Image: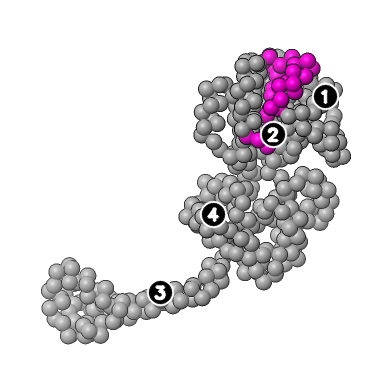
Amino acid sequence: MAGVGVSERPEVASGGPLMLAYYSLSLFVVGGVDLGTPVGGPLWARSLVWLSYFGAPVLAAWTLIQAILHSFAPQSWQLRRLKDHVIVVSSSELSLTYLRRLRKKDPRVQVVVACRNCDQSTAGEIRESFNAPVVIGDITHRYFLEQLRPHLARRILLLGENSLRSYEAATHILELVPDIGRRLIIHCGRLRFMRAMADTRVARECQTFNSYHLAASGLVRSHLVQHFMETKRKDAVILAGFGRFGQTIVEQLQTLALDEMRSMVIIDTDVERRVMVADEQMYFSGDYRRELLEGDISHPDVWRRVWDTITVDSDDTVIVLGTGSEEENMRTALWLRKKAPRAMIIARSSTHSLFANEVARENNITTVSIAELVEEHIPADWVTLE
């Protein structure tokens, strides 16, 4: 359009936009050999056409070379340019929760997800939703670990379910990058194991956490402490379920609201043993009354014994249904709402549920999910990467 023609096809210069577009695209395939050399027009325009003559075939060839290299070694190709990146080990639900929070804070930071195995649907979700490549390998193998370039990473998160393997991977990373320190975050699925490992070098130099601990801490801070402040008398707490979630609720209550409780009732099918195990590493302090009731929360006799122990139907009573059965938590919450309309009732689920939230709103019940609590209370420095 600036007046430059070609020696073999002079009609191109006077052609319409479609003809110009067609012959311009042909430069990527034949590089102009069918058109001849640029002639006429101002020097700047002729120079640009010459640049296109050389640039188009080079770009096409480089794209083809990249495709070939990627087909032979896709992981190496994805990892070769990693720098100032975040490494997430595992494709678990916890990893997806962290990625959601990270992308809300920083949608552009480079992220790579490494795992020993990952199904196609999860890998596709990670790539499409979080713009993160998924690479397959064993993080405890030095060759694979070096491919992830941990010495250039901003943060490494070991979020797998196997606690011992996560500590093993952390040991290898510390040997490879001794100064990584607090940039290495380890999830430990078992509270008892995490407490037992507290004095190891890995625990001292890195950050360790448990997802249930994070969720329970968030629940106490965001729901229970505020409720305690609004009631006139000290509160009675009924805790149904004393697994990892229940134990950490008690731990956080003793840290944040010890003087706000007058009594606590703990219900579990194996309550005596669980409390004995918790007593090994978590000292129960305070002058509040503590009662242990063994049984299933679905059995009416359990709640009859609760009624015989404390006054339930009052606004200074909190009932936390935190067992591993989401259905029983919700069903029992609805039943208790009829029996104790003034009490605060909290039902736990694992993931966000639109149905559970709708039922809860209709019946004045508070529902909390482990995944949402974890996402909301992930420490800010884990997603702030300056």
Instruction: Specify which label sits upstream in the sequence, 2 or 1.
Output: 1
Can you tell which mark lies on residue 290?
Answer: 1
Instruction: Give the mark count.
Output: 4
- Which residue is located at x 71 percent, y 21 percent? 300
Q: For the residues carrying marks 3 and 2, which lies nearer the camera in this image?
A: 2
Q: For the residues carrying marks 2 and 1, which lies nearer the camera in this image?
A: 2
Q: Amino acid at mark 1?
A: Arg
Q: Using residue 151 as the reference point, say whether residue 25 is left or right of it.
A: left
Q: Is residue 217 above or below residue 122?
A: above
Q: Using residue 348 as the reference point, say whether residue 47 is left or right of it.
A: left
Question: How far apart are the alpha carbons under marks 2 and 1?
Answer: 19 Å
Image location of residue 169, percent across then percent down: 72, 61
Question: How far apart are the alpha carbons under marks 3 and 2?
Answer: 55 Å
* Front residue of 90 and 171: 90
Q: Secondary structure at mark 2?
A: loop
> The magenta stretch spans which residues?
297-326
Can you tell which mark lies on residue 63?
Answer: 3
Q: Amino acid at mark 3?
A: Thr
Instruction: Specify which label sits upstream in the sequence, 3 or 4.
Output: 3
Q: Secondary structure at mark 4?
A: helix
Instruction: Specify which label sits upstream in the sequence, 1 or 4.
Output: 4
Q: Amino acid at mark 2?
A: Thr
- Neighbourhood count class around disc 4 (C-alpha, 10 Å): few under 14, some 14–19, many 20 upward: some
Image location of residue 370, percent across then percent down: 63, 39
Residue 44 in view (yes/no): no
Q: Amino acid at mark 4?
A: Thr
Which residue is the site of mark 4? Answer: 122
Residue 64 in view (yes/no): yes
- Neighbourhood count class around disc 1 (C-alpha, 10 Å): few under 14, some 14–19, many 20 upward: some
- Neighbourhood count class around disc 2 (C-alpha, 10 Å): few under 14, some 14–19, many 20 upward: many
Indicate how the structure is coloured in the image.
one colour
* Front residue of 381 and 300: 300
